[in-house]
Every structure is written in structure tokens, then in C-alpha cells.
Amino acid sequence: WVDGRVYSGQYKGGKRKGMGHCYFPNQDVYIGQWKNDLFHGRGKLIKHNGVTYEGNFVDGLFDGSGTLTTQSETISKTFKPSDISAGQLTVECVPRTTEMLR
């Protein structure tokens, strides 16, 4: 790629589709499924700052079950594209209970 990306994987109609992995110039790495040149299906995105997301993507966005791991925490949930805006993740925290209901 002209911008320095390196892609190895499947193509269809001149676009990335199927399984593949891509190394980006900023040191990010994506390994997983593609559709129409976008992350689509199951995959793992490893950011250059150590943050990783492993889960489902739709049209390049987190969408569905996945796990986001940062330096300080791990979040497993069903993500929606609206959870991330301008690079910021919004997560609703729900208190955990250990009380048994009968």
C-alpha cells in the first residue's frame, strides 16, 4: 500500500475479503475477517499502545460480543458502534451482586 500498510490475506474483486492480517504504519495490527476492505466478522485489533480488542466487527466498528483489554482493565461485553465516539469508549458499569435469589 502507498501509505505503508502491509496486508496478507484473501481478496475478492480487488478488495480485502475473507481472512487476512494487516500491519499499519503506526504499528497497529489487525488479524481476522474482512469485507469490502473493512474489518468485518471475528478479529483481533492490537493497537500500538498495547490496547487490544478481540471480538466481532461490522463495517470496521466494534459490534457484538468482544473483549477490550487496556493496561488497567479488561471489559467483556456486547459492544455497539455507538460505544466509541471520537476515540473514546463509553461503558455503563453495573454493580455486581453476590446475593442468591430463591
Image (tube, rainbow, N blue to C red):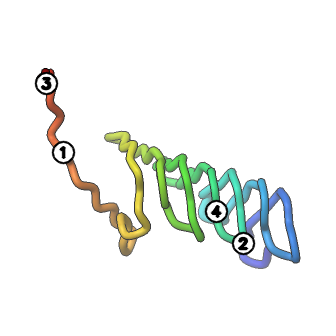
Residue 101: mark: 3
Q: In whole angstroms, how far apart are the C-alphas of marks 3 and 1? A: 18 Å
Q: Position of residue 28 (x, y in %)?
A: 60, 57
Mark 2 or mark 1: name the one nearer the start of the chain.
Answer: 2
Q: In whole angstroms, how far apart are the C-alphas of marks 1 and 4? A: 29 Å
61, 3: nearer the viewer? 61
- Label 2 CA crowd tier, 10 Å (few <14, some 14–19, many 20+): some
Q: In whole angstroms, how far apart are the C-alphas of marks 3 and 2? A: 48 Å
Q: Nearer the viewer, mark 4 or mark 2?
A: 4
Type of amino acid under label 1: Val
Type of amino acid under label 4: His
- Label 1 CA crowd tier, 10 Å (few <14, some 14–19, many 20+): few
Q: Position of residue 41 (x, y in %)?
A: 63, 57
Mark 3 or mark 1: name the one nearer the start of the chain.
Answer: 1
**Residue drawn at point x = 37 percent, y = 40 percent:** 74
**Residue drawn at point x = 33 percent, y = 61 percent:** 89
Q: Which residue is mark 4?
A: 40
Q: In whole angstroms, how far apart are the C-alphas of marks 2 and 1? A: 36 Å
